[in-house]
Amino acid sequence: MGFLVTTLIFSVIGVIASLCTRICCNRGPSANLLHLTLVITATVCCWMMWAIVYLAQMKPLIVPILSEGE
């Protein structure tokens, strides 16, 4: 559930950032394409970083070693 909700939040943030870029930085078709490409790439990279960290915590590669007294 948390993975899906946060993915939707990243999608909404990406759409809002894209709209703000279109409204605030309207300098021509090629500049708009560059700005939108940068915003979408940044959103996807941030989501991928979050997803890798989130999923790595579900099945850790290193298992904690408990001592005999615990």
Image (tube, helix red, strand yellow):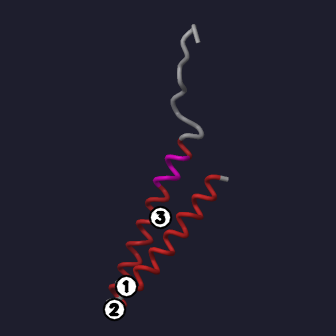
Neighbour class for label 1 at 10 Å: few (<14), some, many (≥20)? some
Q: Residue at x 46, y 80 (%)?
A: 19
Q: Is residue 62 above or below residue 66?
A: below
**In terms of sequence position, does the residue under pointer 3 or pointer 2 come before the other?**
2
Q: Residue at x 40, y 80 (%)?
A: 21
Q: Residue furthest bottom?
A: 28
Is label 1 in contact with label 2 (beta carbons under 8 Å)?
Answer: yes
Q: What span is in magenta?
A: 49-54
Residue in the foreground of this view, choosing between 70 and 29: 70
x%, y% of residue 63?
54, 27
Question: Does the stretch in magenta take in 51?
Answer: yes
Neighbour class for label 3 at 10 Å: few (<14), some, many (≥20)? some
Q: Amino acid at mark 1?
A: Asn
Q: What residue would you read off at disc 1?
A: 32
Question: Does the stretch in magenta take in 42?
Answer: no
Q: Main secondary structure of the magenta part?
A: helix
